[in-house]
Image (tube, rainbow, N blue to C red):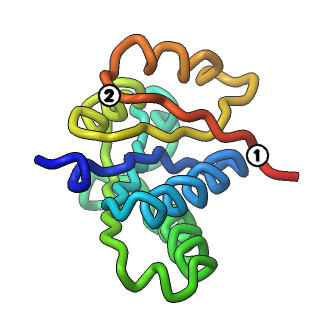
Amino acid sequence: MTAQDSPVVVGLSHSAASTAAVRYALQEGVRHSCPVRVVHVDDDAEHSDRPLDQGGTRPMSSQQRLFGRVGDAMSDLGDAAEEMTVSVARLQGNLEDELTRAAADARALVVGQPGRCRHAGLDERLRAQVDCPVVVVPARP
């Protein structure tokens, strides 16, 4: 895989910082002419109290809203979005483990700034586990 083929990987959640991270990652994809991989993780520990649908996954309505935000961010890029390769993956498992795996071939891993929740310190833990730069994007006012 060439450096140009290495994707920018970005974690997508329900937070405003995550939305800002997706926008940043897409802009980096345009800037470096590289693919962007958007990853949403249904963290088993975080969502264990939510019911599963018949297929064994979480209901899609919230997922559709999340992925709609990717489309909105791409629309903001205008014509530049037409030249981009963007993939979206919905994974299930431990957030930290899944993001680490997703970043194995990445040129950068982008995450929204964690709040004061159980994900506090996620960026530091990811920096210790991945070989690429980890970019932390705060929520925009």
Is 95 situated above or below 4?
Answer: above
Is 116 situated above or below 12?
Answer: above
Coordinates of residue 2 in the picture (x, y in percent): 15, 48
- Residue 98 shown left or right of residue 20 in the figure: left
- Residue 105 shown left or right of residue 16 in the figure: left
Instruction: Report the disc number at residue 100.
Output: 2
**What is the C-alpha distance between the residues marked 2 and 1?**
22 Å
On the image, numbered disc 1 is attached to which residue? Answer: 139
Q: Nearer the viewer, residue 112 or 28?
A: 28
Is 1 situated above or below 29?
Answer: above
Q: Of the residues shown, which amino acid type is indicated by label 2? A: Thr
Is 76 situated above or below 98?
Answer: below
Coordinates of residue 50 in the picture (x, y in percent): 50, 44
- Residue 118 shown left or right of residue 95 in the figure: right
Q: Nearer the viewer, residue 14 or 3?
A: 3
Q: Residue furthest right?
A: 141
Secondary structure found at label 1: loop
Coordinates of residue 140 in the picture (x, y in percent): 80, 51
State which tag comes first along the sequence, 2 or 1.
2
Q: Nearer the viewer, residue 129 or 16?
A: 129
Q: Are marks 2 and 1 in contact (CB under 8 Å)?
A: no
* Residue neighbourhood size for the residue with mark 1, other residues' Cα within 10 Å, grouped as few (<14), some (14–19), many (≥20): some
Q: Of the residues shown, which amino acid type is indicated by label 1? A: Ala
Identify the residue shown where x is 51% and y is 54%: 25
Secondary structure found at label 2: helix
Q: Residue furthest left?
A: 1
Identify the residue shown where x is 50% and y is 62%: 26
